[in-house]
Amino acid sequence: MANTIQHLRADRAVWAQHDIIPEDGELALLRTDDGATLIKVGDGVHRFSELPTVTGEALRGDTGDLLLRHGEDTHFEALEALSLSFPQALREDYYSLLSFDSPADAPTALTYPAEPRIFFSGDDVMDGIFIPGGGKHYTLLFWYDGRIQGLSRGVTLASE
């Protein structure tokens, strides 16, 4: 007798209506309008909308590489280091959202390519360069309007 394993699966409308917390290790699938399937892995803590989409190779541990794909919303908790990259060909309507916590004792070491250049503005930006501070939660919005723009917002984390 064959065993069948079922995973959580729905389209955007259903996930928006039922933004549940998938169990730790539980796969949650999003069926997009264009027929693609996006995968998120539950951690037993965060709602579906708060989980990062698995892309290519998932990040392992507290460091890794992240390709900022169009339309993705990626979240991390305490993050020691992250290397960002962009698709080779950017759509005219390209955008991506990234959020992470930068540890107080050792701010996140964030690297990104020199080309194409990112034109940053917002919190913790000096001369167009974004450098994360320690003990902050960051939200970064990237978009393309002929050049890659990055807007950073940093909020001090509450001490425990």
Image (cartoon, grey):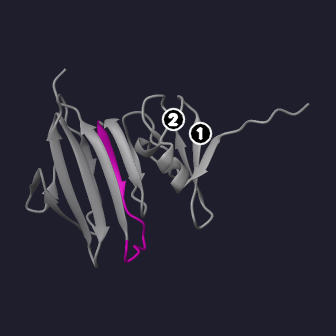
Counting from the top left corner in percent of width and height, residue 104 is at 17, 30
Magenta region, residue range: 80-93
Q: Residues within 10 Å of mark 1 (few under 14, many from 20)?
A: some
Q: Residue at x 48, y 31 (%)?
A: 43
When asked about the image quadrant of residue 133, the answer is: top left
The answer, for residue 62, to whether it is visible in the render is yes
Decide which of tag 1 and tag 2 comes sooner along the chain. 1
Give the quarter of the figure containing the C terminus.
Answer: top left
Q: Residue at x 59, y 39 (%)?
A: 27
Q: Residue at x 71, y 38 (%)?
A: 6
Q: Is residue 90 left or right of residue 9?
A: left
Q: Which residue is mark 1?
A: 27
**Residue 83 inside the magenta-drawn segment:** yes
Figure disc tally: 2
Vertical order, 138 against 135 (above or below): below
Q: Residue 29: image x %, image y %?
A: 59, 47
Kind of residue at disc 1: Leu
Towards the viewer: 145 or 117:
145
- State the predominant SS element of the stretch in magenta: loop
Where's residue 26, x and y in %? 58, 34
153 to the left or right of 31: left
Q: What is the secondary structure assignment of the residue under circle 2?
A: loop
Which residue is tagged 2? 42
Crowding at mark 2 (Cα within 10 Å: few <14, some 14-19, many 20+): many
Q: Is residue 132 visible?
A: no
Task: State if disc 2 and disc 1 touch (CB < 8 Å).
Answer: yes
